[in-house]
Amino acid sequence: MVSQPVIDVNAKRGAEDSGRYFRYMGDFVGWSAKDEETIKRTAPIIEKYLPEIVAKFYSHLLRYPPTRKFFLKKDGSVDQEYVELRMRHLTNFWLRTAQGNYDDDYARYIDYVGRAHTSHGADPRIYIAERYVIGQVGFMQHAISDALTRELRHVDEVLETQAIDAWDKLMMVILEMLARAYGTEREAETFDPLVPIDQAAVTRLATEAFTREHDKDKPVKHTKVLVGSSAEIPEGERKIVHVGNMTVGVFHHKGNWYAVRNLCLHRGGPVATGALEGDTLTCPWHGFQYNVTTGQLLVDPNAKLDTFGVSVEGEQVHLLIPDVEEPAAPAPRALEPDEFRVTEVAPGQTRLVQVGEDSVAVYNVGGTFFATQDECTHQGGPLSEGNLENNIITCPIHGSRFNVTNGQVVGGPATRALRTFRVTVDGAIARVEKQG
């Protein structure tokens, strides 16, 4: 039997003594109220340079194989959506830090960030060696000092000196807060050769991540997307809606309507399908919790799920999706929820589609497509997120294994076979249908 990972509650909320420890270390390095005020004064400088800094930092992560591996799809290509998600986390961390509000909540937030990189985090399978966390802080310390020098040298050299000193002290405290989560954990270095990266693409992602975090409260134009009739989503219920390449959870909650993107900020889990108790929505993968009315991560209100407006006109419920710029070239034919482009699912890859009310996982096995229900028959794990080897898919949650050509169980804890679907290919587009 495959056991579920043990989740440390401190990994989601931060240790209770975090604020005391932050102040203790602050005293040790000579941190003062004047330093806090200096950081607040220089926050606009940090915001100005943050997209550039984040782009350079992630370029380093993607060059080094020990850190690059955390951002790759199963086919070995870079998962740009996940990279941007992590860029948004990092951007939010430094935007919040530059605000100069170092209370107990901020200290617990740093503690939680530190634990998230260790085996004590919400997902024990994710481990970032301590040296890379130390490297991040050192990188940021140098980058912030460089930004301050570029902006203040020959303009206000007194403030430049004060600001660099204040940020250096703060970095010492942050580094100790992050490092104390590791204890005696160690991971050997392999010294693999560096990987070339597309710097321009990384920079574009960093700029987009910064814009999303910094400008997330600015008004934008929206397009209405029909969800369905209000009768389909009675009070206390929800509906998962497919909009382009993303899914959105629409909730009818306490007489109001809310919508959040179905993508957990931690590891991209299907958060909108999780348990809802009061206003707290819990991701079913690793237990990260959000306020469903605002999308805010409970441990850090500055980090939040993408949220969308909902309008009800008569009996019809609509999502309000922000408009995006039109592509320069004509877009290919829009796909139906049950379709996919064959060139986008290479051998060994999977894809999630929707067939009516069924979420269906599609698999490319040596150039031939097969499809089964997406939900593992053990506890509903997303098979489309699993590892496909030849014709065997492994559930990412508890490790059940199935033959995708016929849906049969080949390894527990699951005992029931999967439902299978028919895949038909017409030129460049394939369609998934229920078996007759």
Image (cartoon, helix red, strand yellow):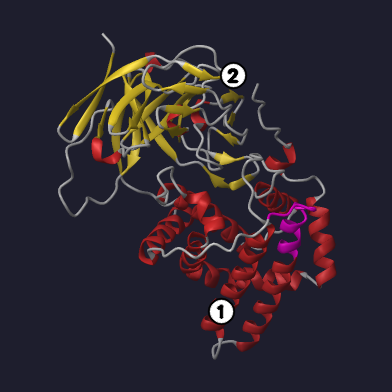
Query: Badges 1 and 2: C-beta atoms under 8 Å apart?
Result: no
Q: Residue furthest top?
A: 436
Image coordinates of residue 165 in percent, x first then y, are 70, 78
Image coordinates of residue 42 in percent, x first then y, are 59, 73
Which of 347 and 133 lies nearest the eye of the viewer? 347
Which of 89 and 182 lies nearest the eye of the viewer? 182
Circle on res. 101: none
Question: Which quadrant does the N terminus fall into?
Answer: top right
The image quadrant of residue 378 is top right
Q: Which residues are magenta?
A: 173-187
Instruction: Say which residue appears at 16% left-offset and 52% top-offset.
Output: 329
Image coordinates of residue 354 in percent, x first then y, are 33, 24
Q: Secondary structure at mark 1?
A: helix
Left or right: 149, with 210 as reference point: right
Question: Which quadrant does the C terminus fall into?
Answer: top left
Circle on res. 413: 2
Instruction: Say which residue appears at 78% left-offset and 70% top-offset.
Output: 31
Q: Mark 2 or mark 1, which is nearer the start of the sequence?
A: 1
**Disc 1 to disc 2, how far (Cα)?**
54 Å
Instruction: Say which residue appears at 36% left-offset and 65% top-offset.
Output: 200
Q: Secondary structure at mark 2?
A: loop
Image coordinates of residue 139 in percent, x first then y, are 60, 70
Amino acid of disc 2:
Pro
- Label 1 Cα neighbours within 10 Å, binned few <14 / some 14-19 / many ≥20: some
Left or right: 227, with 44 as reference point: left
Q: Which residue is mark 1?
A: 146
Q: Is residue 77 visible?
A: yes
Residue 416 lies in magenta, yes or no?
A: no
Amino acid of disc 1:
Asp
Is residue 30 shown above or below 100?
below
Q: Is residue 227 visible?
A: no
